[in-house]
Image (tube, coloured by chain):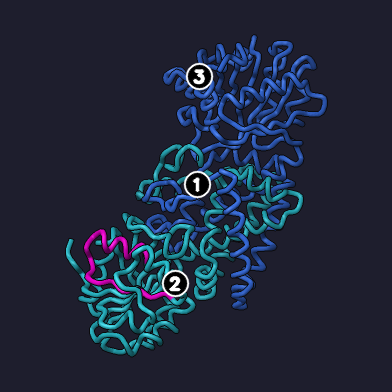
Chain colours: A blue, B cyan
Amino acid sequence: MSVIYDRVALIGLGLIASSMFWAMKRGGLAGEVTGYARSEATRATARRIGLCDRVCESAAEAVEGADLVVLAVPVGVMGAVAADIAAALKPGATVTDVGSVKRDVIKSVGPHLPPEVHFVPGHPLAGTEHSGPESGFAELFDNRWCLLVPPPGSDPVAIARLKALWEGLGSNVEEMDPDHHDLVLAVTSHAPHLIAYTMVGVADDLRRVTDTEVIKYSAAGFRDFTRIAASDPTMWRDVFLTNRDATLEILGRFTEELFALQRAIRTGDGAHLHEYFTRTRAIRRGIIEAGQDTDAPDFGRGQKSS
Amino acid sequence: MSVIYDRVALIGLGLIASSMFWAMKRGGLAGEVTGYARSEATRATARRIGLCDRVCESAAEAVEGADLVVLAVPVGVMGAVAADIAAALKPGATVTDVGSVKRDVIKSVGPHLPPEVHFVPGHPLAGTEHSGPESGFAELFDNRWCLLVPPPGSDPVAIARLKALWEGLGSNVEEMDPDHHDLVLAVTSHAPHLIAYTMVGVADDLRRVTDTEVIKYSAAGFRDFTRIAASDPTMWRDVFLTNRDATLEILGRFTEELFALQRAIRTGDGAHLHEYFTRTRAIRRGIIEAGQDTDAPDFGRGQKSS
């Protein structure tokens, strides 16, 4: 592969940005990659592990001369960061982000950017429960989706170039409009995360079931929930606050259905339960066929986690 | 390892029984292992793949002369199966089960068994989303817990022997009383499964988010839910109907907490969300320290599922 951007600036050096760095290096996709993180400790860690060719002391310094600027900070501070770097952006540069919510980011970042800069919001559908500069790895985006959400009238060349970068990082790229993006993600990611956080919180509250037992006997169901519920608190706080409407709509439907199932349990309506559980199996098969998970008997996780 | 039971009968030939068979063969723990399944197709499959030394045409035939009888059928039919085999049981034999609910099984199976038979209910905390005679594998129980729930006054020798079998199958064994078992499992497994089923059902209902998109863009959260929600419908119907009280209690607490978080989202209470999500992280660390899951950046599942 060849260099797609001569100069890339990563603002925020967490899981996504650090994975992008290693994947850009793996593919030879970028010339110099600069980086900035608000915390001095994070900058020191980045320098120690060789994350970024140059770690800068300000976001403005990092974006100077950059052809691509990646905002990889929690959604709630995207606007403030955009305001901070606006004056230092090179004319013709592309600004993108990796936030899990798109409507709010477009609203908060867009107005700060000068007209001669291309704004192409994005969202790589990839992550782990880990966060911070040391959690990144080059393979994170391999075979995962990256959704680009360019506003109407965006420069097609800027979009194509960013698409080429994400493909070089290993992703499959599609375009989507912001409202639809936020609804799809509310279903597939945001509501499930809130539900997992809630269930783990309930377990934590129960005094009759000691922590030790819940942890010791964590069967498949609960263990999967705890993994989801271990994700970065700041990132997720911001996701829920900025994708409020879609998340609340899905949660409303969720509680409605949950109440119907609870009622079936209370009244002993086994036929209703069996029919419901049979239907949900089909979706799982679809996901396996779509190549987004494996069908190995141990879930591909090795024996211990089956 | 040496033979623990000369003759073992497996009633029901699904994931658990078939894994027990392969693990017993791996460890040389049993002499002859007979098996019975209600469905003729299942019996034919078992014969074809060499599951059981002898596949019988009735449960009574399978248990004849057996030193250990394992009831590995859905919880809802345990009582009927016990009634069916009672007259054929060898005096001094041990009857156990592998059901996910213990209070109801004790109530429905216990009364059918003759006094000269030992009844030691059990529950291996292991499983996958797969079911049927071909889904079993010898490593399923390695490093997992198996809970034994002997009624008061059970024969200590019969308990110790069954414990030795489960240890030979790879498990760590503990004893627990039935009420406590059913509550702990409601928290760690039953409520999480119902919640996962519900969320997958919601996604399936949404017409604006097409099936294809939900499947295609299934991020970590939803994909984990679909795996849980792909489990055997009959088994889970029976779990919810027979562990009704504990499951409904936990679901009541769950909806209470979920409403509090929904309210925090609606009112923009970021501090509440952040505090909650920070607390749930600690439980995850506990599970990793307890050795019930791995801490690999890709969850130990390989790159595609990170």
When the figure is inspected, residue B27 is found, relative to residue B12, above or below; the finding is above
Q: Is residue A63 visible?
A: yes
- Point 73% across, 47% down: residue: A246
Q: In the displayed structure, does residue A116 sit left or right of residue B262? A: right
Q: Which residue is mark 3?
A: A25
Magenta stretch: includes residue B22 = yes
Looking at the rendered structure, which numbered label has been put on residue A200? Answer: none
Q: Position of residue B21 (x, y in %)?
A: 32, 65
- From the viewer's perspective, is the residue at label 3 or at label 2 nearer? 3
Residues packed near mark 2 inside 10 Å, few (<14), some (14 to 19) or many (20 plus): many
- Point 69% across, 13% down: residue: A89
Q: Position of residue A158 (x, y in %)?
A: 72, 19
The reply to whether dot 3 and dot 1 touch (C-beta < 8 Å) is no
When the figure is inspected, residue B186 is found, relative to residue B82, above or below; the finding is above
Q: In the displayed structure, does residue A54 sit left or right of residue A92? A: left
Q: Secondary structure at mark 2?
A: loop
- From the viewer's perspective, is the residue at label 3 or at label 1 nearer? 1
Q: Position of residue A121 (x, y in %)?
A: 70, 28
> Disc 3 to disc 1, how far (Cα)?
28 Å
Q: Is residue B172 visible?
A: no
Magenta stretch: includes residue A197 = no
> Disc 3 to disc 2, how far (Cα)?
52 Å
Q: Which residue is mark 1?
A: A294
Amino acid residing under circle 3: Lys
Q: Tell me where the magenta segment starts and ends, as one range.
A: B18-37
- Point 76% across, 40% down: residue: A179
